[in-house]
Amino acid sequence: MRVLISGASGMIGKAVSALLDGRHEVHALVRDAARARPGDLLWQPASALDAAQIAGFDVIVHLAGRPVATLWTERAKAEIRNSRIEGTANLAQAAAQAFLANGRPRALICSSASGYYGSRGDEELVEESEAGLGFLAEVCREWESAAHPAAMAGVRVAHMRTSLVLDAEGGALAKMLPAFHMGIAGKLGSGHQWWSWVSLKDAARAYAFAVENERVHGALNLAAPNAVTNAEFTRTLGRVLHRPTLLAVPALLLRAVAGEMAVEMLLASQRVIPKRLLEAGFNFEDPALEPALRRLLA
């Protein structure tokens, strides 16, 4: 197949591109002409996309969006929202037009986030669970709704509700490691909040699974089947690194330093179950946290 990927330079985008490149013809949507390779397409997420440009692709994987792990000023929140909703809406409109005219692209695989569910305590969250409250939940609802024109036209649309992605070279885990190596890491707040996670390897494999399986559509929880609490995550990572984790970071301090972002990302409780991926036959190679961390940090 011919696969077009937005956000191909990000952590997940690089992994998905590398995995699919051995199986299909892969190109990227890029904003900077200097970074474009032969076959790549130039785009601006906030601008309409010519349907003819994407009519030759079988599948679009849409990963582009401003990082959320930052201080949520009003400007940052607007950029987070707009970077996801505008880009998705423009891609979906172009995909709908191209599909109705030429029958391609046949699928649009969109990134989303487990933030869709908000903070839900011990509740087991499956794809049919209602959306939650908060900024991230609102963004995720609008983000997924923005792809509706493509689905209405007959394009197969999937929304990958991605949890914390673990990789030693980037993302949240890489940012945690210095404190753990120095022995000054500890649980966040009470530590009772559920942290759903997935290894980068399984995240890329799940995207490839969605690309290649025509029966996969709608919301998909992209999380390993064994969520852990923040306290358990902290103890496990400390054990793997042979470092103490006796300290704790008070919730009050996290709120004071990182504000709303801390409340919705660090202290929120999301016990996400990958029900639909498992039912579709996807096999997680990293289903449990400690073996996954030992592989990543070997």
Image (tube, helix red, strand yellow):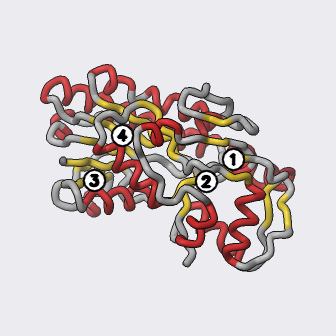
At 55% from the left and 61% from the top, the residue drawn is: 166
Q: Do the residues labelled 4 and 3 touch (CB within 8 Å)?
A: no
Residue 64 falls left or right of residue 33: right
- Circle on res. 69: 2
Q: Where is residue 235 in the image (x, y as percent from the top left)?
A: 75, 65
At 86% from the left and 56% from the top, the residue drawn is: 250
Type of amino acid at the residue the image marks with label 2: Ala
Q: Name the residue under label 3.
A: 28
> Where 113 falls versus 174 (above or below)?
above
Classed neighbour count for the residue bearing mark 3: other residues with Cα under 10 Å, few (<14), some (14–19), many (≥20): many
Q: Where is residue 233 in the image (x, y as percent from the top left)?
A: 70, 60
Label 2, label 1: how far apart the Cα atoms are: 7 Å
Q: Are marks 2 and 1 in contact (CB under 8 Å)?
A: yes
User: Front-most of 144 and 239?
Assistant: 239
Q: Name the residue under label 4.
A: 109
Quarter of the image holding residue 130? top right
First in sequence: mark 4 or mark 3? 3
Label 3, label 2: how far apart the Cα atoms are: 24 Å
Q: Where is residue 199 in the image (x, y as percent from the top left)?
A: 52, 59
Q: Where is residue 119 in the image (x, y as percent from the top left)?
A: 71, 37
Element assignment for label 1: helix
First in sequence: mark 2 or mark 4? 2
User: Front-most of 182 and 228?
Assistant: 228
Label 1, label 3: how far apart the Cα atoms are: 30 Å
Label 4, label 3: how far apart the Cα atoms are: 14 Å
Element assignment for label 3: strand
| Farthest top residue in view | 152
Type of amino acid at the residue the image marks with label 4: Ile
- Circle on res. 261: 1
Q: How many labels does the image show?
A: 4
User: Front-most of 198 and 286?
Assistant: 286
